[in-house]
Amino acid sequence: MLSISGLSVTYGPVHALTDVSLEVPRGEVTAVIGANGAGKSTLMRTLAGLVKPVAGTATLDGNSILGHKPEDVVRMGVALVPEGRSTVPELTVDENLRLGGMWRSKFERAGLNAEFYDMFPALAQRRNSRADTLSGGERQQLAIGRALMCDPQCLLLDEPSLGLAPLIVTQILELVNRLAVEVNIAVLLVEQNAVTALRVAHTGVVLNLGQVVMSGSAADIASHEELRHAYLGY
Ligand SMILES: Nc1ncnc2c1ncn2[C@@H]1O[C@H](COP(=O)(O)OP(=O)(O)OP(=O)(O)O)[C@@H](O)[C@H]1O
Ligand SMILES: [Mg+2]
């Protein structure tokens, strides 16, 4: 379980996160939703060790993940898939996955074999293709697959559905759900698209101007009309 408590982050005078607390259990998808500038990416970057908070704690299975270098946070079991599907365009699918497994990995051993590719049928067919020849949805799968190669206990996904067609979004989110449930990973999914995120998540947290304005079951949040109008714009 990933537990975040009282987390605050500032960029000079900008209060990007204020006293944010939330829990991300294993085997579940927890969605953080909120408009532009709500602080979603800041939360992810802080958990990944890229931004230093001014206050608060974050633990994975009881061990603090704050105050470490990003590469050490990866070793502790936290993998970030940043906004914008980071893959190396000139390398093949296989090569991108191998790069992701530089640290360690049961996935690497099980690795570039049928079992791993079972979860990524689109990638299985393209394993010798260069990343820059993949579609947007395939590239997002590759970015997620690459993060899995570090054998994470906790996966942080920053807007994986951004810019993808609705059908592809559904495929990606089904994959995310399977990873949580079947691999028993704690998944923190950040999305601006609330409808999409709440469809796959078990629990939701609504962030507005860096503060948690509601948390609860995804179904409760999706059916909360005032909240939707006020913060989620639909
Ligand atoms: N490096 C930075 N320096 C200064 N301010 C920043 C920096 N990064 C983000 N901010 C500010 O912090 C706030 C939160 O930004 P953040 O990128 O975390 O939001 P977000 O919810 O991910 O937004 P989006 O939906 O646009 O991705 C915003 O007001 C933003 O302008
Ligand atoms: Mg963002």
Image (cartoon, rainbow, N blue to C red):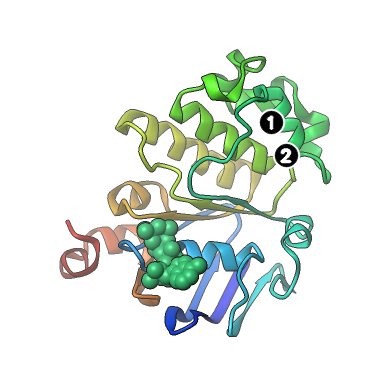
State the residue in front, 123 or 174: 123
- Could you tell me residue 66's position as x and y percent? 69, 74
State the residue in front, 25 or 88: 88
Location of residue 94 (image quadrant): top right
The answer to whether residue 39 of the structure is visible from this angle is: no
Q: Is mark 1 within 8 Å of ligand 2?
A: no
Please determine whether, in this image, residue 71 is positioned above or below residue 58. Answer: above
Q: Which mark is residue 41?
A: none
Q: What's the distance in space between the residues labelled 1 and 2, CA to CA?
A: 6 Å
Q: Which residue, given by chain and number where applicable, does mark 2 sit on?
A: 100
Q: Is residue 124 left or right of residue 12?
A: right
**In which of the image's four quarters is ligand 1 placed?**
bottom left
Q: At label 1, which amino acid type do we have?
A: Asn
Q: Which residue, given by chain and number where applicable, does mark 1 sit on?
A: 96
Q: Indicate the quadrant containing the N terminus: top left, top right, bottom left or bottom right.
A: bottom right
Residue beneath the point at 76% across and 31% down: 98
- Could you tell me residue 113's position as x and y percent? 75, 21
Residue beneath the point at 51% across and 22% down: 134
Residue beneath the point at 74% across and 45% down: 150
Residue beneath the point at 71% across and 19% down: 114
Q: Are marks 1 and 2 in contact (CB under 8 Å)?
A: yes
Q: Indicate the quadrant containing the C terminus: top left, top right, bottom left or bottom right.
A: bottom left
State the residue in front, 190 or 134: 134
State the residue in front, 130 or 139: 130
